[in-house]
Structures are given as structure tokens and as C-alpha cells.
Image (spheres, rainbow, N blue to C red):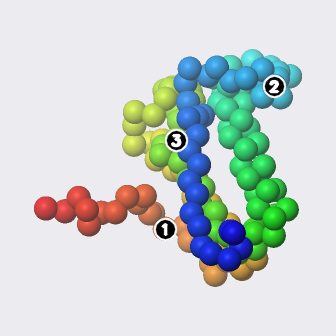
């Protein structure tokens, strides 16, 4: 069915985000980090990122196994970054680099990337907000 006609799927994740109640299997991946290496908040943040990486890895594996990956476009982005102690701040309430620089990765199957752009981009349609 999916090979014959175009289809769309969106997957949303609730993290990485506080309350940092990461499942033990993911939190344990970072248990050997010492407080001198990284503060506990960052350890939890990284374990939440890994918690998101695993289902993405499974989705890509499933697409690959079914022969759909080469004709699939995957877009990965986020709504904001985190301070995680940078600038002496926590969470996301600023326009500092750590809050506003977020990932945008586009996997285009077997197609080569035309270029890598480092320009500032906006993730919402600006024209919708004009009066």
C-alpha cells in the first residue's frame, strides 16, 4: 500500500523536557558521568534525548526494512532549546543562543544534499501573522 501511493506521518515527542522522569534504561546510559563532568540536569537532558533517538531509529529501520526509506523525506526539528546551566540559567525563557538554536535535520532518502545552509530560519509561516 505505502509503496504505491504517497503518505504522510507525523510523530511528536514530549521531551526532552522537565520533570526529567526518564525511564531507568535511558537514565542508566549516563550513570557513570560524575558531577564534575556534568551537572545532574544535563545528565537527565541527555537521557531524554536518547529516549527520543530510539523510536526514531526504529522508524528509520522499519522504513528501510520495507524498502521505503529511499523514497521518504524525514524532517526532524524542535520548538526550543534549553539553557541547562549555561549563562547561569535553566530552562528556555530567553532569546540566548542555547534557547533559540534548535535542530533542523532533513533526511531525503538516497538524494544528495544540494547544500548546507547556515542562514537564520523561522519555523512558522510568517505570512499568517501579518495583518
- Would you place residue 57 above or below residue 3 in this image? above
Q: Read off the residue under disc 2.
A: 25
Element under disc 3: loop
Element under disc 1: loop
Locate the C terminus and report the quarter of the image it occupies. bottom left
Distance, label 2 to label 1, CA atoms, is 38 Å
Comparing 27 with 91, the one in front is 27
Distance, label 3 to label 2, CA atoms, is 24 Å
Give x and y (percent) for residue 28.
Answer: 82, 23
User: Which residue is located at x 71 percent, y 49 percent?
Assistant: 56
- Whether residue 38 is visible: no
Q: Are marks 3 and 2 in contact (CB under 8 Å)?
A: no
Q: Read off the residue under disc 1.
A: 119
User: Which residue is located at x 68 percent, y 40 percent?
Assistant: 52
Give x and y (percent) for residue 11.
Answer: 59, 49
Give x and y (percent) for residue 84.
Answer: 57, 30
Quarter of the image where one finds residue 95: top left
Q: Read off the residue under disc 3.
A: 81
Comparing 124 with 8, the one in front is 8
Quarter of the image where one finds residue 6: bottom right
Amino acid at each position: 500500500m505505502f509503496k504505491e501511493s504517497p503518505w504522510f506521518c507525523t510523530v511528536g515527542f514530549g521531551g526532552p523536557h522537565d520533570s526529567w522522569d526518564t525511564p531507568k534504561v535511558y537514565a542508566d546510559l549516563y550513570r557513570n558521568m560524575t558531577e564534575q563532568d556534568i551537572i545532574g540536569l544535563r545528565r537527565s537532558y541527555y537521557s531524554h534525548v536518547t529516549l527520543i533517538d530510539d523510536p526514531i531509529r526504529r522508524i528509520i529501520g522499519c522504513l528501510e526494512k520495507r524498502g521505503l526509506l529511499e523514497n521518504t523525506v524525514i524532517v526532524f526539528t524542535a520548538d526550543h532549546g534549553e539553557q541547562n546551566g549555561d549563562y547561569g540559567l535553566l530552562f528556555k525563557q530567553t532569546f540566548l543562543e542555547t534557547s533559540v538554536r534548535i535542530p533542523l535535520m532533513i533526511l531525503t532518502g538516497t538524494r544528495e544534499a544540494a547544500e548546507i545552509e547556515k542562514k537564520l530560519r523561522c519555523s512558522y509561516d510568517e505570512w499568517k501573522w501579518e495583518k
